[in-house]
Image: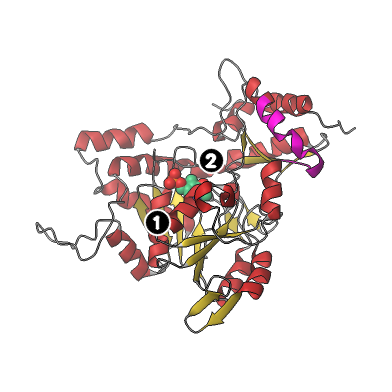
Amino acid sequence: MMKTFSVETVVSVLQSVVPAEERRVPLHEPVFEGNEWLYVKECLDTGWVSSVGKYVDRFEQMLCEYTGVKHAVAVVNGTAALHICLKLVDVQPGDEVLIPALTFVATANAVHYCGAIPHFVDSSQKTLGLDPVKLEQYLQEIADVRTDGCWNRQTGRRIKAVVPMHTFGHPVDLDRLVDVCQRYRLELVEDAAESLGSYYKGKHTGNWGKMSALSFNGNKLVTTGGGGAILTNDESLGRLAKHLTTTAKVPHPWAFLHDMVGYNYRLPNINAALGCAQLEKLPKFIERKRSLVQTYLHAFEKIEGVQLFTEPSFAESNYWLQVLLLDESYKDHRDELLEATDRAKIQTRPVWTPLHRLPMFQQCPRMDVSLAEQLERRIINIPSSPNLEAANHGEA
Ligand SMILES: *Cc1c(COP(=O)(O)O)cnc(C)c1O
């Protein structure tokens, strides 16, 4: 028997999966149960805390092994990683960069840091990320492909790149997007900040873009406190990324020689130490998150009006943040549900405000983004920490 929708029913189902005790159930908290103390202590004991040290190298090497991308450069955060990716695919001041309307603000900020203009694209129902089919139809209407790239007929500006974002770990349809990029002469940069551990057709995300960005912020699946990484399969771009994020310092035993305006973006060794210990645990975290999906699916299957969002058929997702999707007919209950879960000491969140509605991006060009608008009213993130499933199964 299906239970009819009510805010109380949804809250009680959540309580059955993630009971709040004296402590609030957080949306996502980091789990340190491996070699974190050991590695960080070693940094302190040896004095190697800053941006040169063995953990930085080891962290980068582990990222390459895990993702299958050839070169990784560890940086201070995911936003800085995106900034450098965009610079290195030659996004110039006055260019436009296509990004989803529904993403974290960092994607648009990084475009702005390059002096470029974000151009917003609608979402896909299947992935919650940028929709390559809608994008192609839209480009047919507004873009001219010339030998010198893709031009927006309406604004007269060059459209240089596309930055898809793998929302809450769910990969966008990369093959279709690569095809659109090739036909429209657009550079592809993946914002893979949320998709460490997510695979598209068996291959790790971050392998399709000419460059890709990861984030290791405190709320991500793997954290270094704060941190990020630039990924690329292109050796010379990898070398340039490392150079540009190390203040463009020319190697020399003592002289301060810099051959371009660089950035102080490298990740300190002490943060990388944390990252190495966290990466060792990543397969375990993902196993638990994928198991939590099953628990939630089972719990919500008999409740009318809400659905747990599951990975698209071509992908294997890390399920970074679990998504409860309200049916269109119940979308007006979103805020009530957010308030009721808050009272029940279970942390939930709405999705981001679509970026074209933020004051600094309101004037930016965009296509019809009605699905992004609709999804905003229907998405609720529910507790997703990797330690939740362990607790459910009585694991230590
Ligand atoms: C976390 C995140 C980033 C990067 O964030 P930082 O806090 O700078 O590491 C970028 N894009 C998206 C979509 C993110 O979720």
Q: Name the residue at 24% across, 56% down.
A: 247
Residue 391 versus residue 177 in the image, above or below: above
* Three-letter amino acid code at the position of disc 2: Lys
* Picture quarter with the N terminus: top right
Q: Position of residue 252 (x, y in %)?
A: 13, 61
Q: Nearer the viewer, residue 288 or 217?
A: 217
The residue identified by callout 1 is 113
Q: Is 332 a magenta residue?
A: yes
Number of the front mark, 2 or 1: 1
Give the quarter of the figure containing the C terminus.
Answer: top right
Q: Coloured how?
A: secondary structure
The residue at 53%/75% (across/down) is 151
Based on the displayed image, in which of its 4 quarters is residue 248 positioned? bottom left
Residue 391 screen position, x and y as percent? 59, 26
* Crowding near the residue tagged with mark 1, few <14, some 14–19, many ≥20 C-alpha atoms within 10 Å: some
- Residue type at the position of mark 1: Tyr
- The image shows residue 97, relative to residue 125, as above or below, that is below
Element carrying mark 1: helix
Q: Quadrant of residue 234?
A: bottom left
- The answer to whether residue 286 is left or right of residue 54 is right
Q: Tell me the residue that label 2 is attached to.
A: 284
Segment tinted magenta in the rendering = 325-339
| Residue 64 in view of the camera | no
Say if disc 2 is inside 8 Å of ligand 1. Answer: no
* Percent position of residue 75, x then y: 35, 51
Using the image, determine if residue 301 lies above or below residue 123.
above
Q: Is residue 353 visible?
A: yes
Residue located at (68% from left, 70% from top)? 137
